[in-house]
Amino acid sequence: MTRAKKLTRLVFPLIMACMAATVSTRAADKSEGKSTPSEVQRYVRPTDPSLYVGADTCKTCHEDIYKDFANTPHFQTTMGKRGPQWQGCEACHGPGKAHVEGGGDVTKIFTFQGVSAQESSARCLDCHELNNEHSNFLRSAHLENNVGCISCHSPHHAKESQFLMKEKTPELCYGCHQDIKAQFDRPFHHRVNEGMVQCSDCHNPHGGFQAHQLRATVSQDAVCVKCHTEKAGPFVYEHPPVKIEGCTSCHTPHGSVNPRLLNTSRVNLLCIQCHSLASGAMATPTFHNQAQKYQACTMCHTAIHGSNTDEFFFK
């Protein structure tokens, strides 16, 4: 049997298994009521100008809401732009003629209460999907879990002027991510609670292609070296975990009880997870007896993230 045929026999079953897993995942999503990006219904704006009544008509009944809305960026960017389907209240709620003629019948106009996150967000994405920041929201973990645009943003009653947020960060994020809030309460943490770092500096809440909606590679190198530039490299001698597994192979990104956000309490305990005979990697030399003198490997291997001069990261 030729090598090509052998490879085909090995690889083909793996491909079929992956395809089967994808189909079963989509079937599970449908059974749980989740929508895949291709299944989300796009909003199509009616273009007949006779169906629209204008924001001033809306104001006659909804004066309080109109007063708040008139001070928002939405109002300022929609009024007087393009056709009536892109202006004022009806830019989001759709044409209001039938609603007005029905004496305020709520079934005659689109309201954002009582609809799925996918349906309400489709209205927002009709404008905002053109922005690169929001272009992946349809595949985001938030939308897959029925967290839509108005879960975080309030077009009418925003508490924060920036981005029409319902609450300032990180309190807004902590409303759902209580486990992460607890991590930031640990003794050593990134300064999110102090306002020096934002959740969105590392994560894109509107989705992306990476795990945890990170703004960089799965290894997390790029997102970390935005601030930790001295760790960026490239180096002549690379430390494999940094490039292969990423920063989280040694550090806990949100918060830790250990200095430098390390995953273990002592440096040598962290290093021997890889550098031991059992791991199959380069083992710790026998003369490193893990006594007091050798409890911190980085006392000697100071350039542990990478070095341009020494393969053992001595400098």
Image (cartoon, rainbow, N blue to C red):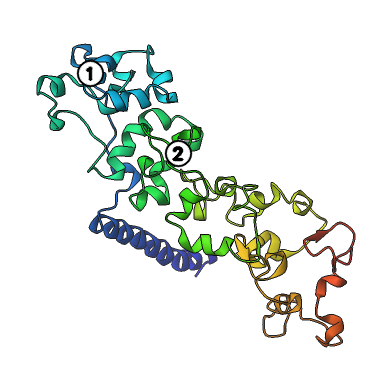
* 47 w.r.t. 177: above or below: above
The residue pinned by badge 1 equals 60
Is residue 126 found left or right of 163 in the rendered image? Answer: left
Q: Residue at x 55, y 50 (%)?
A: 214
User: Split into 4 quadrants, where in the image is the C terminus?
Assistant: bottom right
Q: Residue at x 28, y 60 (%)?
A: 28
Q: 278 or 14: which is nearer to us?
A: 278
Residue ranking furthest to the front? 64
Q: 220 or 7: which is nearer to us?
A: 220
Under mark 1, the amino acid is Thr
Locate residue 40, reporting x and y percent.
29, 41
Locate residue 77, reporting x and y percent.
43, 19
Number of on-image labels: 2
Q: Secondary structure at mark 1?
A: loop
How dense is the environment of label 1, judged by Cα within 10 Å: few (below 14), some, or many (20 and up)? few
Locate residue 89, reporting x and y percent.
30, 23
Q: Is residue 288 visible?
A: no
The residue pinned by badge 2 equals 165
Q: Secondary structure at mark 2?
A: loop
Q: Quadrant of residue 120?
A: top left
Under mark 2, the amino acid is Met
